[in-house]
Amino acid sequence: MLVSESDIPLYDPMTMYQQLVSEEGSRVNGCAHSRTDRRRWTWRMRSANLKAYHWRKSTQWFMLTRPHAELVLGDTEVYRRFEEHCWYGWDNDYRRWRDCFSDEHYMPTLFAVHKIQTDSNCGAVGVAATNWSGGAHPRSYSQEDVTPALLTEALRSPQDGCDAQSAWEAAQKMFVKVDEAFNSGLCKVPLPEYESHLTSLCKVTARKFPVEVVQQTATLFTDCNNGLHLLAPGVCAAHAEQGGESLS
């Protein structure tokens, strides 16, 4: 999973892990759609296997399954064409400025070349919840913005059927404490299958949280009583035993 330095996770480590490893597809949109920005393509990018009809666009913050990550690591043909011809600058062939950004086009175009996810998981829009109300660039959150309500009502997208509470509860059932594992013979006890309550439309990180909101974000993450469940239950339980109210 690729994240930026201004990203924060929207779920605790247990839920993040279970959700991502349970997904069969990558969070990359390799489908043909109307917003592929064909004007960024140039005929110079063509190769034996890469053609104009393969051109795709997806979000730059993605998650790859292991097989798809291996595909990316093993690719040279498509990568070299992007390296040589996907850039921002004046293009004499088209007599205009051509603004090509590899982080938005390379991965989905590679998928299209290999016929991967070209007609499935088309709703995948990456991993990061982003506020585009500021225009061409994501809006940065202010100190006043960083509240529990920001996560529960906006970033966790309950309107898209993203059930954060059920996802958290399902993830907890998949983990066993170390002492319980050794005392009960974990290998003999079948673990339940993870029941996902988050689709590929449900973001698992959010941006942008600039350095100016570090303290507010830290407070959000270390509050065991705000209902967000951003810390592992054991951390909050141990802190409660010590009579603490906040970890910040």
Image (cartoon, helix red, strand yellow):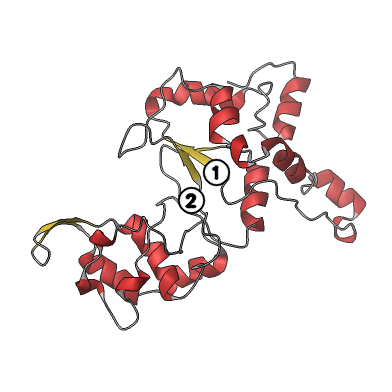
Q: Is residue 169 left or right of residue 31?
A: right
Which sits earlier in the primary sequence, circle 2 or circle 1? 2
Please give the name of the residue rendered at 65% of the width and 33% of the height, measured from the top-left corner.
Answer: 231
Element class at badge 2: loop
Name the residue at 75% across, 52% down.
Answer: 194
Which residue is at 52% across, 54% downward? 123
Kindly identify which residue carries mark 2. 126
Disc 1 designates what residue? 203
Answer few, some or many: residues within 10 Å of disc 2's Cα (few below 14, many 20 plus, some between 14 and 19): many
Tell whether label 1 touches label 2 (CB within 8 Å): yes
When asked about the image quadrant of residue 177, the answer is top right
Crowd tier of the residue under label 1, counting other residues whose Cα lies within 10 Å: few below 14, some 14–19, many 20 or above = many
What element does badge 1 sit on? loop
Residue 106 location, x and y as percent? 36, 63
Residue 140, disc: none
Residue 7 percent coordinates (x, y): 46, 38
Q: Nearer the viewer, residue 61 or 235?
A: 61
Expressed as whole percent of the image width and height from the top left, the position of residue 85 reads 21, 66
Vertical order, 3 against 105 (above or below): above
Q: Between residue 60 and residue 232, name the one nearer to us.
A: 60
Q: Amino acid at mark 2?
A: Gly
The answer for how far apart the CA atoms under marks 2 and 1 are is 7 Å
Q: At 90% from the left edge and 60% from the top edge, which residue is drawn?
A: 188
